[in-house]
Image (cartoon, rainbow, N blue to C red):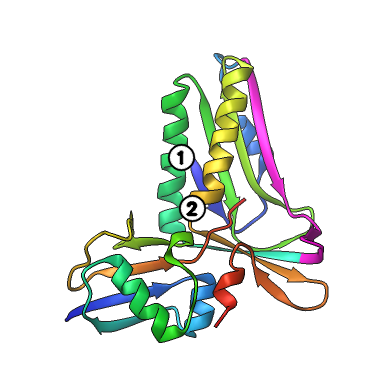
Amino acid sequence: MKTITVRYFAMFREHAGLGEETLQLDVATALDVFEQTRSRHASTEPSGHCKVAINDEMAEWTSSVNDGDTVLLFPPVAGG
Amino acid sequence: MFAISDNDISVDALREQLMDPGAGGLCVFEGWVRNENEGRTVERLEYEVYEPLAVSEGEKVIAEAREQFPHLQACCVHRSGLLEIGDCAVWVGVAAPHRDEAFKACRYIIDQIKVRLPIWKKEHYLDGDTGWVNCERCANV
């Protein structure tokens, strides 16, 4: 198990009802974090439309997560 | 230069910053808040921005444009917070020796900013409802 801080933005934050939580998760990649938190908060957004960052660096869904990491989950963006 | 602003964008000051004796022209894109989207009347917009990454990713986009077109000056400012109809939501300016690279770089910057930066747009509709743009599926619980 790893201690992972997960941060939610925009629609994800509204769904989760919180901006951040620290969880004990059995995860290897950013995608594992997304899927476990998605089922926890009942979102159906596919990962393909979303983006992820780890410790304030943009990352890939296949990127490894380590104990103590902060994973930022971004719903589909809409700048401009 | 890329920045996020929670106040009105000072267009004249940005234009001034790009003044360069080697530039033969300035190409500007201003994104404005529109009063309609997909058939719904929009009353105002709200931008949520994760500033640390929006700024670093925005700087990367500008650096990429300058790599493709080495002799240009470029800057972009994106708003955060609550905006009214007609407000300037994003300003991109590119000064270059010739118009072709100015148009192309300006187009590259705005296109990339729309799809890469952690910025989210919530529309407030006339009927009191709200909706996150591009995020309809997130609502299916």
Relative to B21, residue B81 above or below: below
Determine which quarter of the picture holds residue B97: top right
Q: Which residue is mark 2?
A: B117
Amino acid type at mark 2 = Leu
Q: Alpha-carbon neighbours of circle 1 within 10 Å: few (<14), some, or many (≥20)?
A: many
Image point 46% across, 62% down: which residue? A50
Q: Which residue is mark 1?
A: B61
Image point 26% across, 76% down: which residue? A4
Please give the range of residues in magenta.
B24-43
Relative to B53, residue A74 above or below: below
Among the two numbered marks 1 and 2 on one chain, the one whose residue lies closer to the N terminus? 1
Relative to B73, residue B61 above or below: below
**Residue B25 drawn in magenta:** yes
Task: Classify residue B20 as left or right of residue A57.
Answer: right
Q: Position of residue A57 (x, y in %)?
A: 32, 56
Amino acid type at mark 1 = Val
Name the chief secondary structure element in magenta.
strand
| Residue at disc 1, secondary structure | helix
Q: Alpha-carbon neighbours of circle 2 within 10 Å: few (<14), some, or many (≥20)?
A: many
